[in-house]
Image (cartoon, grey):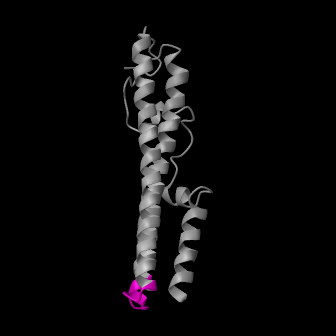
Amino acid sequence: MDINQKNDIPETFILKEIDLVQSCINRMAANSFDIKKWSVGIIAILAGLLKQNMLSHNCKIGALFLMVIIVFWGLDAFFLKTEKLYRKKYSWIIKNRAKGIASNLFDLNPYNKDMMLDKGSKMPHLVCVMLSKTLFPFYAGLAIFCIVVFMW
C-alpha cells in the first residue's frame, strides 16, 4: 500500500490503534519502573549482606555490584528507547490518520521508519539513552552508593 494512499478510515479503527500504541507506551514505562525497583532491591540486599559480614570484601563482590548495575541500566535504557520510538509512532498516527492515510494500519513495530514524522532522524542509540538525563543520574548515584558501601 502506498504511504500517501488515502482511504476513509473508520474512527473506531483510529481510536483503537491509538489505544494500542498508548498501551505499549504504558507497558514500557511500567517495565522501566520495575527495572528500577529490582535494581535498588538487589543492590540493597547485597549491601545488607555485605554489612552483616555474610559476604567478604573482595573484587568478586565489587564486580557483582557493578554487573548488577550495568545489566539493569542496559535493560532500563532498552525500555526507555522503545518507549521513545512508540511516542514517535503515536505522533505519526495522530497526524496522518486524520489526513486519511491508511498505510501501516495497526502496525505496532516500533522500528518501522515509515511511521515517524522525522524520517531523516536516526534511531536513538542504546548508549545515548543510557547516558540520558533521566537514567544517568539514577544509575550513577546507585554506583556511587555501591562504592561507598563496598569501601566502608
Quadrant location of the C terminus in the rendered image: bottom right
Residue 11 on image: x %, y %: 44, 12
Residue in the picture at 46% in, 56% down: 76
Q: Which residue is nearer to you in this view: 133 or 42?
A: 42
* Residue furthest out toward the top: 8
Q: Residue 9, image x and y in percent?
A: 42, 11
59 within the magenta span: yes
The answer to whether any part of residue 16 appears in the image is: yes
Q: Where 97 sits versus 71, above or below? A: above
- Give the residues in magenta: 51-62
Say if residue 102 shows up in the picture: no
Looking at this view, name the residue that lies furthest to the front.
52
User: Which residue does the image show at 57% across and 35% down from the upper left?
Assistant: 118
User: Between residues 99 and 68, which one lies in front from this camera angle?
Assistant: 68
Query: Is residue 91 shown above or below 16?
Result: below
Q: Position of residue 17 (x, y in %)?
A: 41, 24
